[in-house]
Amino acid sequence: MTCYMIRLRYDGTDFCGYQPQSNGRTVGGELLGALRRTFGSVTSLAGCSRTDSGVHALDYRASFRSEKRLEPQTAVRALNAWLPDDIVVFGCQYVSEDFHARYSVTEKEYMYRIRNSSLRDPFTDRYTLLYPGVIDLQRLNRAAECIEGRHDFTSFTNSGASVRDHVREVKHAYFTRQEDEIRFYISADGFLYNMVRIITGTLLDMASGLIPYEAMPDIIAACDRSVAGRTAPARGLFLNKVVY
Amino acid sequence: MTCYMIRLRYDGTDFCGYQPQSNGRTVGGELLGALRRTFGSVTSLAGCSRTDSGVHALDYRASFRSEKRLEPQTAVRALNAWLPDDIVVFGCQYVSEDFHARYSVTEKEYMYRIRNSSLRDPFTDRYTLLYPGVIDLQRLNRAAECIEGRHDFTSFTNSGASVRDHVREVKHAYFTRQEDEIRFYISADGFLYNMVRIITGTLLDMASGLIPYEAMPDIIAACDRSVAGRTAPARGLFLNKVVY
């Protein structure tokens, strides 16, 4: 039995998220199909994150086991031959038996892309949120800083999540700007359901004046989803980095 | 009667080129529909270039006339409300009666994007040619330089073109590299049918060893399509700039 870890990128636009399901096209479902064609059979397939429908990934990790032992480069080539155009595998390595793509994660970083413009753009609309208003990056970064550290993030998760413990540690949260593109980077030891999208939506509601910039500590302390802002759309969200 | 010039960007992937036709979705056809909805009726619609099926544009120009006089910013907003997601108008200005988006052009620049990698990429495959081999940019740039100047470009156009005069003046032709992306920029007073794609294909055939790097002057002199290289695919080609 050989244990593998693979790295993949995918354009989430046309997927119902990562998690395989009986209805709808999923990244995990397509991956499982390609793994079966390449390895015959695999067991213990695990993805590093259950990304939502429409969310993209630049460096997703998955682990699995198989009786068949392939050279990593051979596995990459074979998998890519079977995978659809919107998923690509760019790395494969052997891992120890106790490695699990999801449970072994120590830190994950997401990136949210915002195009600060009043005009649609045919080349980037699939991957960015269009935000036409003025954005004061300095004030936004001060609000984002309040999120850093160990907090109960109940205000930033949508109901329906079965997870009981809502305490997570955010390592960093900041915005950058390059021309008309603004990016929000957030890294944590784990994320609750919709957490990045609600944090991003709340920060953008601050930029547009719906929520005061100074309200972040109170929103965190409230532990109440209704005091935070809207959920930003999935199209701008990318899983950017995973640390083990 | 008011004369207008508009600037547009489009993702050419799902279009049968610019030129309106009875079968197939075209940029010009979609544009005409949006112009009619915005202006009631328009005359003398002209595009700056008959881009091929699949070719993209970052700054395309079109001119037209209408009895209706709209403020440029109003026209931009109205047109974008009617245009599909893969076309956006980002500029509009009044022009003199003798302006024609195609005949008034003095120089056009195309850009060809090549991803120098052995792996597909879901985010850029629509807009780049995947080229996995080693590319010697210095030797390619020396070959590209031979194209600059006034030449008969018969070797670089596909039959079926009705244009008799094949002499064009290339102002510049060069490659740049940034990480794994190589770009070829070529500017001229005009281009023959498929000229940029055949020049790009010929240069890439040099990179891969099918044609010697030193052959460029002979290929130009031959005035024979069969001695040049293949036609590079449309997906990597962008109309980048138009000068009047």
Image (cartoon, coloured by chain):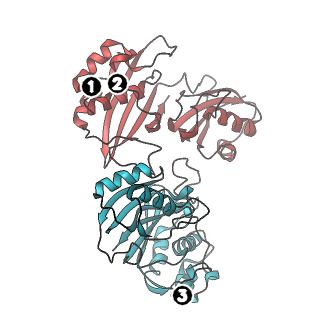
Chain colours: A cyan, B red
Tell me residue A72's x, y (percent). 29, 58
Q: Which mark is residue A164?
A: 3
Residue B195 or residue A56, whichever sits in front:
A56
Q: Which mark is residue B8?
A: none
**Quarter of the image where one finds residue B230:** top left
Q: Chain of mark 3?
A: A
Tell me residue B25's x, y (percent). 64, 35
- Does label 2 lie on the same chain as label 3? no
Q: Are marks 2 and 1 in contact (CB under 8 Å)?
A: yes
Residue B68 or residue B134, whichever sits in front:
B134
**Quarter of the image where one finds residue A6:** bottom left
The residue identified by callout 2 is B229
Under mark 2, the amino acid is: Gly
Tell me residue A177's x, y (percent). 44, 61
Q: Are marks 1 and 3 in contact (CB under 8 Å)?
A: no
User: Label 2 vs label 1: CA separation?
Assistant: 8 Å
The residue identified by callout 1 is B211
